Image: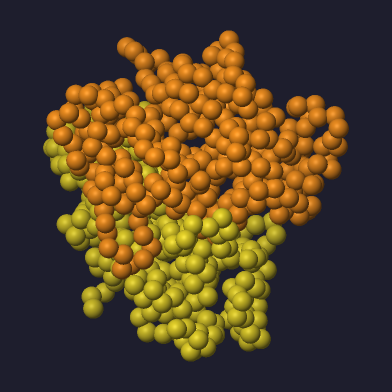
Chain colours: A yellow, B orange
Amino acid sequence: MTAPVLDIRGLSISYGTEAGALKALRDVDLEVGEGSIIGIVGESGCGKSTLISAIIRLLAPNAQIVQGAVNFKGRDLLGLSSEQMRALRGDEISMVFQDPMTSLNPTLTIGRQMSDVQHRSTVSRSEKNACSVMMLERVGIPDPEAQLKRYPHHLSGGMRQRVAIAMALMAEPSLLIADEPTTALDATLEVQIIHRLKELQREFGCSILFISHHLGVIAELCEEVIVMYAGEVVESGPLREVFIDPKHPYTRKLLECDPARIAEPTRELPVIEGSLPNLVNLPDGCIFKDRCSKAEARCGIEPPKMSGDGHRAACHLLDHFQETSP
Amino acid sequence: MSTLLAVNDLRVRYPVRGGFVDVVHGVSLDIKRGETTAIVGESGSGKTTLAMALCGLAPVYGGEVRFEGELLQRDRKNRLNPDRKRVALMFQDPVGSLNPRMTVRKALAEPFRIHKVESADPDREALGLLDKVGLGEDFADRYPHQLSGGQARRVGVARALALRPHLLIADEPTAGLDVSVQGEVLNLLSQLQQEMGLGILVITHNLNIVRHVADRMAIMYLGRFIEQGDSQQIFSQPRHPYTAALLAANPSPDPDAQPGEIELKGDVPSLLQRPPGCEFHTRCPGVREKCRGLFPEVSIDGEHRQYHCFYPLDY
């Protein structure tokens, strides 16, 4: 196997708050192989955003990196100066955000914004424009030349998101981070964007880190998936294995709760009882034990470690589950 | 069951440079007591504008609306004026729709003060409402920024239901929520609906929740309902090609699911340049010559199923 593009080891991040350090991310490992598409799922507050912000080094000022390393193509991103980091962003690593209306500047034309992202290139303006037109074509925007003169509000939601993707891929990055890029779109456009991302990934060979809490979108796009809960990775592995045979009780519950998986219409949808633990005063033992129906005495004492090969999970009761599962 | 809201040929038109744009273009809809109707469609199809017009927050250009049998009059600015005590609105952004400088207690007591409900003790009512939506008394003195998305949503539900409305209009009531919290909010709405006989109009683009909570559904495209009817029937047998594409495109969380997608070409046309003929013909996989020139009037099919298509899908 070739060296991973992104390799995160033991990353822990805390936020300074009045009540004390909020341990938003604890001992997170993540590996993104060259040309792979990895999905991150988890509910709000699970640390997805903190993780991305750490990778692109745009953490809030009260965030503190407690320990760990973020290796990107052999360089430790956490050790780079802000100038060096700025040189990477939008070049080697780029991002597509959730809301294309707020990530594009409403007062500048699409053409202007697309040549702005080529600020590193020394070619002439007309060449930059030609580049923009080509990129817009590749993401499937009709009549790209005419679009350059238009403003974001002239475009539909799906087109705006495709413009954002075109801008992100402009510099042919090695890693594309997409943070819920389809939440603002309807199902037909969502599928269009997912297909487009898959195609572009094949063409450009970049790796994609895809964040979503829409399990259907993850299933459609990703090869591997990472499940996070309350700041920890609780399960990871090939998508099929994780979605068909989830090992961690949290993953099981999360999948059970998805209304798309419930065939018979019901007015009483399943929920995960209880609430997220307090991340300032962390409970002892397993982070999920208070909401887990199978918790035992040792779950309250000792935090479980990730175990397994390929398909990994952090739970004391893994063997127990394997016996009981059909 | 009796009809709560009857909308007939409702139109919302905004002036733009060099003309006007019809955001809601002749929408008709009946909502019955105790029933949930869902409106689905992509962003920009006019869903939210329709909700706003029904609540009197957007001007109406044409059509009429009856609420509990009485015709709603328009005010000077052409807005409808439903009795706000009987029609409640839940907004899209749960935190943004709460005043950041008001505690939960104050926000919940406000409807009673505004509508001068004298019989009620607003403070006691506020606590009762919190209990009803499953939040403890200790939430009463919190500010919106101290609430999670799900909790803020519950406060939104409590506030909307404070004056025991007969109709609740919920604009994307679960957008941005996790599946588990989404389940909690929807269960809460279903439960309150049973207790209060509430009619609910849900606006969403999440088809998975529509399948579970809606009795009826309407699919909106370019400001029109291209199909409406019983939601189970529509899910099993869509007649309009756009409905079929929308339902088929819904990504399945089952990794082995066969993608039965009907890929739609191109983009949604601009409201400023509505296509001639059937407005869906530019993207329709089954387009024929007639569709390009003639507008398909409404077809009625069995149990109140309505759609606009010359060549509906057969089963």
Residue B183's spot in the image, x, y percent? 56, 56
Q: Can the viewer see residue A110? A: no
Q: Is residue B44 left or right of residue A297?
A: left
Q: Which residue lies most toward the front here?
A: B302
The residue positioned 49% from the left and 76% from the top of the image is A248
Q: Which residue lies most toward the top here?
A: B76
Q: Nearer the viewer, residue B308 or A2?
A: B308
Residue B279's spot in the image, x, y percent? 27, 29
Q: Quadrant of residue B125?
A: top right
The residue positioned 50% from the left and 53% from the top of the image is B212
The residue positioned 60% from the left and 54% from the top of the image is B187
Q: Nearer the viewer, residue A287 or A280?
A: A287
Viewport quadrant of the N terminus of chain B: top right
The residue positioned 66% from the left and 86% from the top of the image is A297
Residue B72's spot in the image, x, y percent? 59, 19
Residue B210's spot in the image, x, y percent? 47, 48
Is residue B58 depicted above or below A103 in this figure? above
Q: Nearer the viewer, residue A27 or A136?
A: A136
Q: How many numbered circles does the render carry?
A: 0
Q: Is residue B131 left or right of residue B310?
A: right
Q: Can the viewer see residue B17? A: yes
Q: Is residue B273 left or right of residue A267?
A: left
